[in-house]
Image (cartoon, rainbow, N blue to C red):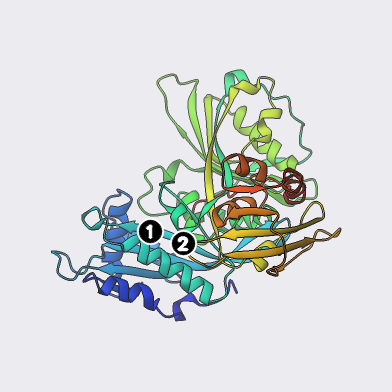
Amino acid sequence: MASLDTLTLPLDRTSTEELASRGLEYARVDPDGDGYRPFQRAVARGFLGGESTDEEAENARLTLRTRRLTGVYDRGGAEPEVPVGTVDSWATELTTSPGRQIDLWAISAVTVAPTHRRRGIARAMLGGELRTAADAGFALAGLTVTEATIYARWGFSPATWASDVHVDTRRAGWSGPVAPGRLDFVPREGLIARIAAVHERVRRQRPGAVPGWDGRWRGVAGLAPGDKAGEKVRAVAYRDPEGIERGIVAYTIDDRDDFSAHDLEVRALFAETPEAYGALWRFLLEHDLVGTVKAALQAPVPPLQWMVTDRRAVTATLTDHHWLRILDVPRAVASRAYSAPLRAVVRVSDPLGFADGAWKVRIGDDGEAVVEAAEPTDAVEVDMTVNALGSLLLGGTRIADLAAAGIASGDPAVLAAVDRSFAPAMTPLLDIWY
């Protein structure tokens, strides 16, 4: 279903009527039409960005032509052509276990003009996205967030966490393994294809990951218009002894007054194997004239901390990153492999109705799950919110912690069994923004 053309799906009628009752218009935006630049202007305002140049707008259009752009308009305003609300969505895939994917309704560019807050615009837009996704057969919706206080009311909850890593190279000292392959600088010409190839293999094995796209990789490679640091981008690839490119890093170096201690900032580091990961990180930490290495969207507990002589030279600041919203409990839960058998009747409360109900969860010795609606006579053993189930799904959060927070409950023995079963084969991580 990730190949579904979301552009053919109709606008949500409920949202259309809700907004019309407030004097607002809910409308699709054609990336090749006159409404595209005003839409882009509204998104830039929403994220406190500057006005884009024609070249930057055309670069973004390459990606947005495949996206479902929707705007909310106040036609009585001073700029009636500029939407007061925006959202951008598309069909993609989410890796739920190594080698297993499920279709995902991805949501981005959610903005509401500060002049039009508290008028139900965000509620209508996000409700419309979820209803459209559910009607189209998606079991999950997802997004990355700038403000963590907004999305829980629509049933989204953090499912993966990521770390911003800062390393003091003068303290770190490499103690990790020596990789058997080789490192080489690679030119920016062709870098997009190289990054895409490595990331595509990595994301299929990492729970929580989604596919990248050319526009994302143009930004990483410093090839997007308006990137003032683009000319500084350097890239190094790791090849294993068989000559296969297993990892790649793109980075820039910012000058400091102390010419022996510049800042190296990683734009992306993707490694398919532990050897590639170690080789690329050793290269970064031992780079000449660098005092600090910074890298965002790393694993919650970076393996790097176990590869240096002074682990406190590595500071990892944890934050939530990938938020999921379950729309279909049986298909979402059955989309991944599990670590232990489980038999439980789970009650999920969902004020919006998509996932609400009691469900019999049966996970066999083979790690496969079957989920069916419970019978009225079935005794509920675990109770949780749809938000809690979204956080639990990939195994990045323990149900014991959710129970401690009051958003899940049940017999301690059953909760322990859930934790054993949902333990992930690999720590979930989303390594890009979308």
Task: Indicate the position of residue 357 as horizontal and vertical percent values.
Answer: 60, 65
Relative to 415, is 324 above or below? below
- Identify the residue under disc 2: 107
Q: Which mark is residue 225?
A: none
What is the secondary structure assignment of the residue under circle 1? strand
Query: What residue type is disc 1 on?
Result: Val
Q: Residue at position x 68%, y 62% from top?
A: 333
Q: Quadrant of the N terminus?
A: bottom right
Q: 396 and 216: which one is in front?
A: 396
Q: Residue at position x 26%, y 65% from top?
A: 83
Counting the numbered discs, the total is 2
Q: 295 and 136: which one is in front?
A: 136
Q: Residue at position x 65%, y 55% from top?
A: 203
Q: Residues within 10 Å of mark 2 (few under 14, many from 20)?
A: many
Query: What residue type is disc 2 on?
Result: Ile
Q: 190 and 82: which one is in front?
A: 82
- Residue 75 in the figure: left or right of residue 49: left
Task: Indicate the position of residue 365 as horizontal and vertical percent values.
Answer: 86, 58
Relative to 295, is 220 above or below? below
Q: Residues within 10 Å of mark 1 (few under 14, many from 20)?
A: many
Task: Indicate the position of residue 66 as horizontal and vertical percent values.
Answer: 46, 71
Dot 2 and dot 1 residues touching (CB under 8 Å): yes
